[in-house]
Image (cartoon, helix red, strand yellow):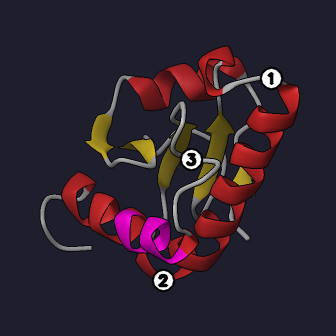
Amino acid sequence: MPATLTKRAEFLAAARGGRAFSRGFVLQGRRRRAEEPGEGVRVGFTCSKKVGNAVARNRAKRRLREIARAVLPEHGRPGWDYVLIGRAGATGSRDFALMTEELSRALGELHGGAS
């Protein structure tokens, strides 16, 4: 499993990077600068209150963690930070296999066509 983003500044930095959209989630990502700490792939997860109550948000984040665990070791790039953002009415109920395919495609988009 990739390292987890924990600080607000790390999430804000990823938000200033590139974006890729899918029906199940939004992917933000950026390449870390050489002087920034951390190595390998780092990932963060977030869901706003639009996704639903705490139970719905936690379920959506668990699903995002699982697709990240399945896809990022193969398609993520070392030295990159990624943030997966849950979408209202989609992340918690969308087909899991479809979401893993969407993450692979979104990573390809974010990296400029080839992941």
Residue occupying the point 43% across, 71% down: 98
- What span is in magenta? 97-102
> Which residue is more in the foreground, 36 or 47?
47
Tell me the amino acid under the disc marked 2. Glu
Give the CA separation, mark 1 to mark 2. Answer: 33 Å
* Residues under numbered marks 1 and 3 in contact, where contact means CB atoms less than 8 Å apart: no
* Residue 6 forms part of the magenta stretch: no
**Which amino acid type corresponds to the residue marked 1 in the rendered image?**
Asn
Q: Secondary structure at mark 1?
A: loop
Q: Secondary structure at mark 3?
A: loop
Foreground of the two, 109 or 40: 109
Question: Magenta segment, principal secondary structure?
Answer: helix
Dots 3, 2 in contact, CB < 8 A: no
Quarter occupied by residue 62: bottom right
Q: Position of residue 65 (x, y in %)?
A: 70, 58
Residue at which label 2 appears = 74
Residue type at mark 3? Thr
Q: Residues within 10 Å of mark 1 (few under 14, many from 20)?
A: few
Residue that carries the numbered disc 1 in the rendered image: 53
Q: Look at the image and tell me whether residue 77 can be seen.
A: no
Name the residue that disc number 3 marks. 91
- Report helix, strand or loop for mark 2: helix
Q: Nearer the viewer, mark 3 or mark 2?
A: 3
